Image (tube, helix red, strand yellow):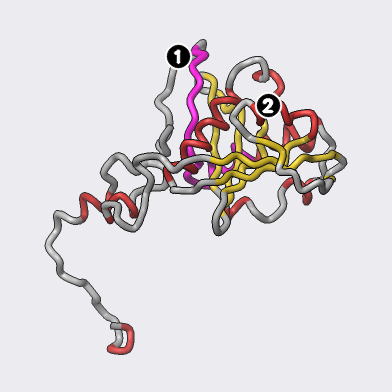
Amino acid sequence: MHGTRIPLAKPDSRAITVRLARDPSDLMLVTAIRSAVYLAEQDCPFDEEFDGNDMVAAHFIGYIGNEPAGCLRVRFFGDFAKVERLAVRHQYRRSRISFKLVQASVDYVKRKGFRKIYGQAQDRLVDFWAHFGAKPLGHNRKITFSDFSYTEMLLEIEPGPDAITLDSDPYVIIRPEGDWDRPGVLDASAGRAVTSPLRDLAPADR
């Protein structure tokens, strides 16, 4: 998994790939997939599905061949990450794309150094999340929204050996999100001489 766009594959390719959303076009794909699943199939009201959190989250897009087939959202809090809004288009639900999306998000959260992943699973999907080691949280409180009943789930994890910390290479920290292992444009800019260009700025702006 990384954040760059996938190369074009043969039209009949069934290879599953997952990447992070990068730009407004990617968010349009996410919107289209979730609209097909939650608005069309589950009759979720628009303002409940598109809840104001999409611009403050990381989004994963899963492909089968060249076709965007599923997506998932991750948000971050003080000591945990929340994995949510997993959606797979109906014609791809016999594939393993849902597993690939969740595993990519778990690996991503580990790389960011978190130890807990929280989720709210529709009751019928508790066993799916248990596949990854998630367990009901045990608060004995019921959550219902958008006409479904949900179970709070918790997955306890260990940060990856390459988790990003304050001791990490500073160039790794400023690379594109999720694409930390490849030099980025700012790595390349470090080869230029330091000139501190501040043209046409008033003294107070310097």
**SS at badge 1:** loop
Residue 183 % position (x, y): 26, 44
The earlier-in-sequence mark between 1 and 2 is: 1
Left or right: 12 in relation to 179: right
Residue 87 % position (x, y): 67, 32
Residue 141 % position (x, y): 82, 48
Q: Residue at x 49, y 43 (%)?
A: 109
Residue 105 % position (x, y): 53, 37
On whether residue 15 falls in the magenta region, the answer is yes
Quadrant of the snapshot with the C terminus: bottom left
Query: Which residue carries the number 1 mark?
Result: 10
Q: Residue at x 81, y 46 (%)?
A: 140
Q: Does the CB distance between marks 1 and 2 fall below 8 Å?
A: no
Res 119 quadrant in image = top right
Query: Which residue carries the number 2 mark?
Result: 128
Marks 1 and 2 sit apart, C-alpha to C-alpha, by 31 Å
Q: Amino acid type of disc 2? A: Phe
Q: Residue at x 29, y 40 (%)?
A: 182
Left or right: 153 in relation to 71: right
Residue at the far top: name it: 12
Residues rendered magenta in the picture? 13-30
